[in-house]
Image (cartoon, rainbow, N blue to C red):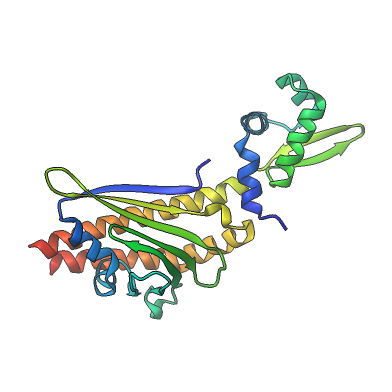
């Protein structure tokens, strides 16, 4: 089984996929594959492939209505990574401050 | 999106003073986390947050420790996810030392593990470590 977060990083590494994901986030409703194709001037096949990669990373869910497929964005996986980064950013900042205090005190 | 945390800090202390503070168990236990640590390749260390609060420990293995680069793996207790912490010291012309710290490997985390880990952080480990740091800061300053 491929690691989920690795899949996530691969999915957002591509600028076109980031652009598609961003368009889904700012759209107030779900976008159909056709709407995405019109927005981006990429082939239908290309869009379908990008959407599939985003779906595998948990960033997009797809709902079929008749012949059209609608894409919904899901930003939650990104929030999880963001939380991890935020936690350790703060953790290391605090730790290095603590190291500084320790060293200053040791000198005196 | 980055998969690495980087910190740089300049200290007005000699490179050997800082190397000692980040490699000796006794000193680590004072300013960082209670540590069973040796700066020897292959040494399996433990950082223990205070047990009475039910905090998680950090385990890992020292991968490199030649002055002035220290690298060890970082595994949070009850997870099997390995990240890597790298310390690098560099003397600055005219005195002082630049410390460069890297923590990498977030892409090793599986989504589910990450969620579990954050739950345990907000449930205690986070506050515990921060509380410990605040305590140390106060004690060291007061001492």
Q: How many callouts does the rendering have?
A: 0
- Residue A51 position, x and y percent, is 75, 36
Q: Residue B24 vs residue A76: left or right? A: left
Towards the viewer: B73 or B113: B73
Q: Quadrant of residue A15?
A: top right
Q: Residue furthest bottom?
A: B52
x and y percentages locating residue A56 in the rendered image:
73, 46
Q: Which residue appears at 34% of the width and 56% of the height?
A: B87
Q: Is residue A84 above or below residue A23?
A: below
Q: Position of residue B56 (x, y in %)?
A: 46, 72
Residue displayed at 32% across by 61% down: B66
Q: Quadrant of the C terminus of chain B?
A: bottom left
Q: Position of residue A65 (x, y in %)?
A: 88, 35
Q: Residue furthest left?
A: A108
Residue at the far right: name it: A66
Position of B11 relative to A18 (above/below): below
User: Where is residue B33, by image quadrant?
Assistant: bottom left
Q: Is residue B29 visible?
A: yes
Residue A75 appears anywhere in the view: no
Q: Is residue B71 above or below residue B57?
A: above
Q: Is residue A33 left or right of residue A84?
A: right
Q: Residue at x 19, y 63 (%)?
A: A102
Q: Quadrant of residue A38?
A: top right
Residue toward you, B26 or A82: B26
């Amino acid at each position: 089984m491929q690691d989920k977060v690795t899949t996530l990083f691969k999915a957002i590494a591509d600028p076109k996929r980031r652009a598609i994901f961003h368009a889904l986030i700012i759209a107030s409703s779900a976008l159909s594959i056709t709407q995405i194709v019109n927005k981006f001037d990429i082939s239908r096949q290309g869009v379908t492939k990008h959407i599939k990669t985003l779906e595998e990373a948990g960033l997009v869910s797809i709902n079929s209505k008749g012949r059209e497929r609608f894409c919904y964005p899901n930003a939650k996986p990104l929030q999880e990574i963001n939380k991890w980064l935020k936690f350790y950013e703060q953790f290391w900042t605090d730790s290095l401050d603590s190291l500084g205090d320790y060293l200053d005190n040791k000198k005196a | 999106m980055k998969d690495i945390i980087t910190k740089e800090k300049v200290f007005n202390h000699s490179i050997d003073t800082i190397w000692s503070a980040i490699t000796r168990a006794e000193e680590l236990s004072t300013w960082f986390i209670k540590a069973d640590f040796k700066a020897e390749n292959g040494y399996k260390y433990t950082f223990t947050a205070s047990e009475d609060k039910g905090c998680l420990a950090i385990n890992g293995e020292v991968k490199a420790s030649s002055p002035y680069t220290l690298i060890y793996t970082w595994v949070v207790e009850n997870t099997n996810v390995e990240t890597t912490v790298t310390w690098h010291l560099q003397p600055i012309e005219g005195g002082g030392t630049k410390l460069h710290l890297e923590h990498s490997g977030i892409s090793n985390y599986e989504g589910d593990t990450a969620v579990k880990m954050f739950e345990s952080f907000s449930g205690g480990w986070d506050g515990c470590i921060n509380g410990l740091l605040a305590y140390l800061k106060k004690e060291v300053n007061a001492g």
